[in-house]
Amino acid sequence: MFLSIKNIPKVSWSSKKPLNLKPKISTFFYLCIGLGIFGLGEGLLIISYTGASPWSVLAQGISLNIDLSIGLVTFFVSLFALSLWMFLDQKPGIGTIFNIIIIAAMIDLSLAFVQTPQSYIGQLIMAIVAVLLVGLGSGIYLIANLGPGPRDGLMTGIQRKTNLPIAVVRAFLEITVVSIGWYLGGTVGIGTLLFAFGIGPAVALGLFLVAKTFS
C-alpha cells in the first residue's frame, strides 16, 4: 500500500512552491518538527553502535580525526554539499538551510543525552527505531515542500547534469561517503545495512502516515 507511493503528497500546510521565503507558520512548524525527528533518528543510529547512515559514517570518521563533534562535522559537511550546488544550477530553500542547522543540532543533543543500550538486541531495536524515525521525519519535511536537503539537492543536481539514473547517482554518493568515513574510522555495521535497505520503505511509510493524518 504505502510502498506504491510515487509522488510527494500535498496536505493543507504544504508550501505551494519550494522557493517560498514567507511560508505559513504551520508549514514552517512542521518543517522544523520533521527535521528534528530526522536528526534524532540519525543520532540514535550512531548511538546504537550498530553502524550509522552513510553520511553520518563520514561525519563520525572526520570527527574522530579532528576536535569537533559529530553534529558540528555534519553541519560543515552539509555546507560543503550545499556549496557544490553552484555548479549544478540548484537553488536552496528555507528547508535547505534549516535542514543543515536542525539535523546537526539534534545529532549532538542525542549523543549528549541518550545512552547506548547494553544488550545487542537493545542496540538492534534502537537502530530499527532510528531508521523509522528518519523515515517519518523525511515524510514530514518533504511534504512541507520548502526545498530539499543539501545532500538530496546534490543528488538531483548531479542526476540532471549527467542524465544518469537517480539510483546510480545515489548509490555512487552513498558508497563514496561511507567508504571515506569507514577509512577514517567511522562505524559501519548492521545498522548501516538496515539504513541502506530500510530507508526507502521508511520514507514511503512516513509520507503515507503524514498524508493520511492530515488528509
Image (cartoon, rainbow, N blue to C red):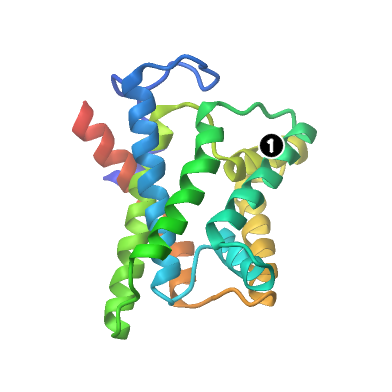
Which residue is at a point 51% across and 17% down the rendered structure image?
20
* Rendered view: 7 above or below 102: above
Expressed as whole percent of the image width and height from the top left, the position of residue 162 reads: 77, 41
Q: Report the side of 11 relative to 91 (left or right).
A: left
Q: Residues within 10 Å of mark 1 (few under 14, many from 20)?
A: many
**Snapshot quadrant of residue 127:** bottom left
* Rendered view: 121 above or below 144: below
Looking at the rendered structure, the number of numbered marks drawn on it comes to 1
Expressed as whole percent of the image width and height from the top left, the position of residue 156 reads: 63, 38
Q: Nearer the viewer, residue 72 or 188?
A: 72
Q: Residue furthest front?
A: 67
Give the position of the N terminus as an image quadrant. top left
Q: Report the side of 151 relative to 87 (left or right).
A: left
Q: Residue furthest bottom?
A: 119
Which residue is at a point 54% across and 76% down the rendered structure image?
187
Which residue is at a point 41% across and 19% down the rendered structure image?
15
Which residue is at a point 52% across and 16% down the rendered structure image?
21
Q: Report the side of 127 relative to 56 (left or right).
A: left
Amino acid type, callout 1: Gly
**Snapshot quadrant of residue 128:** bottom left
Q: From where the camera sits, is residue 3 visible?
A: no
Identify the residue position indicated by label 1 in the image. 157
Expressed as whole percent of the image width and height from the top left, the position of residue 109 reads: 41, 56
Expressed as whole percent of the image width and height from the top left, the position of residue 148 reads: 54, 35
Under tag 1, what secondary structure? helix
Give the position of the C terminus as an image quadrant. top left
Q: Nearer the viewer, residue 3 or 195?
A: 195
Q: From where the camera sits, is residue 134 visible?
A: yes
Q: Nearer the viewer, residue 97 or 14?
A: 97
